Image (spheres, rainbow, N blue to C red):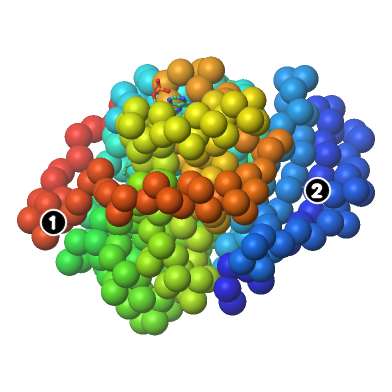
Amino acid sequence: MTLSTKKQIIAIREYQNRETDFVFGSLAAETTKSSSGEIEPTYKTSFWEEEIQTMEYFTLNNGIQMPAAGIGVFMMSPAEAEASVESALRSGVRLIDTANGYMNESGTGRGIKKSGVPREEIFLVTKLWPTVYEKETAVDETLARLGTGYIDLLFLHQPTDNWKEGYKQIEKAYKEGKVKAIGLSNFPEDLLQEATCTMEIKPQVVQVEAHPYFPQTGLKKILKETGMVLMSWYPLGHGDKNLVNEPVFAQLAENYRKTNAQVILRWHIQSGNVVIPGSKNPDHIRDNFDIFDFALTDDEMAEIAKIDKGMRYYTATPELIAQYAKMELQPDL
Ligand SMILES: NC(=O)c1ccc[n+]([C@@H]2O[C@H](COP(=O)([O-])OP(=O)(O)OC[C@H]3O[C@@H](n4cnc5c(N)ncnc54)[C@H](OP(=O)(O)O)[C@@H]3O)[C@@H](O)[C@H]2O)c1
């Protein structure tokens, strides 16, 4: 099944007291199509701390619904991750991306608890690090650090030689209900195809570097065939001012009364990418979620496509990948 056939439009307006939930009829009946003929993501609208927020969802190839935007906590200490996650959840964000390798899963779990948001409302994403691919207790230890009974999406973080061992562990956890969806991070196209063809349970999501300087055009054709969703890391180019301040974003930001970063994140979602911008700044965290009340036109999307430089900020080498297989994790407190 391809991505286009999996996306449907529904809209639900929720009031904070949860007593007056109803289907938001005018949107519920609507089905929009992009220029490529794809049906647009699902829409939900909710009230949160007296603000109206709107979220869009992608439906994965196993039927799971995934929010189109969340936050990532890469390069944050456990205390910073805790504060960032709590702030994000209080702002209405419902998707959190962490990893064994970030060594802040415990802080992430504390942030979730402190936010008071029920676990079932949160889409929690993490990644197994290569040194635990062959450790039978890897998933259970990850669950313990996060303080949760299940993970919504569990990635293999790197395509090291022992990746099939890690994949089997995730498949086992998936069958046991400890993991709701499987992802591959930083996997090259040939290994993605191998996983799709040879593993018992097909992967649902791939997480790779993607932004307007490197939109992953080639990979996206393959993903369409395999029904996988792309999750962008470095969605804002890791904060690169050259990217964020491109004139096309400044112009569109002025037209829509948004910030340049919001325009870039909107471009991702309309390109079919889930975004997980990282931020320690509560205002940025709130802004990065406030991207569902405007839409770029096909012409504007085409203008943005012109700044594709085929430029990655990070390039994996075989030596680097081999090092990851030996890099032991430090305690995550
Ligand atoms: N799978 C992988 O191997 C991999 C690799 C890298 C990253 N990731 C994931 O991708 C996530 C995002 O990556 P990233 O955080 O490195 O890069 P990013 O999201 O592209 O950029 C983050 C930078 O942008 C700034 N920023 C965020 N929102 C902004 C806004 N509204 N206006 C202006 N500046 C803004 C942040 O500064 P402030 O703190 O000041 O807001 C920070 O310096 C990570 O947290 C992680 O979850 C995965």
Q: Please tell me the numbered disc located at residue 286.
A: none
At x 30% / y 36%, what residue is drawn?
102
Q: Is mark 1 within 8 Å of ligand 1?
A: no
Q: Which residue was labeled with disc 1?
A: 317
Which residue is farthest left? Answer: 319
Residue at mark 2 to residue at mark 1: CA–CA distance: 44 Å
The quarter of the rendered structure image containing the N terminus is bottom right
Q: Residues within 10 Å of mark 1 (few under 14, many from 20)?
A: few
* Residue 103 screen position, x and y as percent: 29, 34
Q: Which residue was labeled with disc 2?
A: 11
At x 63% / y 30%, what residue is drawn?
255
Secondary structure beneath dot 1 equals: loop
Ligand 1's image quarter is top left
Tag 2: amino acid: Ala
The quarter of the rendered structure image containing the C terminus is top left
At x 67% / y 55%, what residue is drawn?
41
The quadrant in which residue 72 appears is top left
Q: Is residue 221 visible?
A: yes
In-front residue for pair 235/203: 235
Left/right placement of residue 96 relative to residue 129 reads: right
At x 38% / y 66%, what residue is drawn?
219
| Mark found first going from the N terminus, 2 or 1 | 2
Q: Residues within 10 Å of mark 2 (few under 14, many from 20)?
A: many
Q: Is residue 166 above or below residue 314?
A: below
Secondary structure beneath dot 2 equals: loop
* Residue 16 screen position, x and y as percent: 80, 27
* Residue 128 screen position, x and y as percent: 32, 51
Tag 1: amino acid: Thr
Q: Is residue 93 visible?
A: no
* Residue 261 screen position, x and y as percent: 49, 31
